[in-house]
Image (cartoon, grey):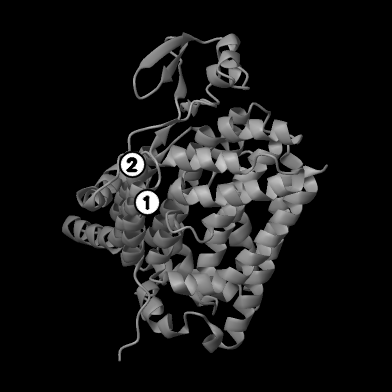
Amino acid sequence: MKTLKFPSAQTILLIIAGLVTLLTWLVPAGKYQTLGYDKTANQFTRVSLEESVTLPATQETLETLNIKIPLEKFTSGDIYKPINIPNTYQQLEAKPQGFFDFVKSPVKGIIEASDIIFLVLIIGGLIGIINSTGAFDAGIGWLANALKGREFILIILVTVLVAAGGTTFGFAEETIAFFPILIPVFLAAKYDAMVGIACIFLGSSIGTMCSTINPFSTIIASDSAGISWTTGLWIRLFMLFACLTIALIYIIRYGKRVQKDPTKSIIYDQQQQIAALFTQNNSKTVTFTTRLRLSLIVFALCFIIMIYGVVALEWWFVEMTSTFLVGSILIGIIANIKEADFIDTFVKGAGDLLGVALIIGIARGVTVIMADGLISDTLLHYASGMTQGMNKGVFASALTAIYAGLSFFIPSSSGMAVLTMPIMSPLADSVGIGREVVVNAYQFGMGLFYFINPTGLILASLAVVKVGFNKWLKFVMPLFIILIIFTLVVMTVTSYM
């Protein structure tokens, strides 16, 4: 009898999509009315399924709708997406999704996620071009020798830097670009690929979980809750430092075990496969010519420019993708790669990440099924009712758990904020705690579940390195449980302060 294999990322997501399709037959359909601000006309638009009504953009309008948010949060652009209007949930005629809706969902998801999919494919092409020059392998060899005996510095440096990006500007989807770049560095330092995955993915996850000035979570959630983003900031700073310290200790201890005895690696059976995947030119001796140095400089500048553009210039996927495309062409010119060879190498590099792109699209398809089945708002309505009448500590912990569950259905941090905060934040008033507790519960709940959320980025990230989801769960679950307990204790204590 053959041993059953854990299913691939694509299969896992298709199974989830199938289960969510069945859920649309069981969960009642429903919808909140939404309120959006039109900057050009300086007016609100109230949208229900029956009609769309324009309203004057005044504080009085917001108070009439029981929305406890200052008007300037809308007019300044801090809240740029339509928000749910409290107490407007209506149960609607069911819209169960059928077999053909399930079949179409991955295609719809790929279309909706085309921006990030093109980013991933262009990054794949860039990686293919820089690998073909041999410069990257030579650079990795030099770095491995420089860090000999002090490899733990690599773990700390990568994790802290990625977390810094997560806490400041929501460095998440962009991390896909760093797996093919940094995994070979960790392999050269005698770690396994799991250490590299952990440093990049957990660093990003903890950074976004404990966001401090991240406009896509902290600021938009605080604005949607009607409070300043600085309220509750000290708790998030404490959590950032504490969770990052716990994660670093965990990763470093695992990394040391693997260095001493490679058979202790969770992915030991894949060691040769992964090494072959990331050390294509390892057998060649590469001399650092001026061309190769310039190629590496352009390669590094692509990432520096991308980060600067996102932080300072309000760039998003189109601009980021264009940066990597231009970088690929420049490297091709500098390295004197023939036009036909450049095209072949670029296409092959993009093809290497095509599986990752499909995973992203299929995951988005799960969200499409829920939106078309009108069950997302119903789940939010039921979740908000569960916390009524609780004491402070139980409320804070329960809300963290609720947000973790909701993030399976609404993996977007900004989407979760504008959809849930107008509904959830008033619940804090009835319990007698500050609304910043709700904002923190939203961040910590979403952030913790993000570690293992199959509708998030973890499956796409693992696919880049060809590591199974089961192997990741085996690695991360002890840390996941530790951080859950720690977070719930912090939430309970701070709710009474």
- Residue 104 percent location from the top left of the image: 22, 49
Q: Which is more toward the observer, 190 or 68? A: 68
In the rendered image of this protein, does residue 390 appear above or below residue 293?
above
Quadrant housing the C terminus: top right
In the rendered image of this protein, does residue 158 appear above or below residue 278?
above
Residue 437 placement, left or right of 58: right
Q: CA distance from mark 1 to mark 2?
A: 9 Å
Residue 43 placement, left or right of 120: right
Q: Badge 2 local density, few (<14 within 10 Å), some, or many (20+)?
A: many
Mark seen at residue 56: none
The local secondary structure at tag 2 comes to helix
Mark seen at residue 23: 1
The reply to whether discs 1 and 2 touch (Cβ–Cβ < 8 Å) is yes
> What residue is disc 2 on?
373
Q: Which is more toward the observer, 379 or 170? A: 379
- Residue 314 percent location from the top left of the image: 48, 33
Amino acid type shown at disc 1 = Leu
Residue 159 placement, left or right of 302: right
Q: Quadrant of residue 8?
A: bottom left
- Residue 108 percent location from the top left of the image: 26, 45
Quadrant housing the N terminus: bottom left
Amino acid type shown at disc 2 = Gly
- Mark yes or no: residue 104 visible: yes
Point out the residue furthest to the bottom here: 1
Q: Badge 1 local density, few (<14 within 10 Å), some, or many (20+)?
A: some
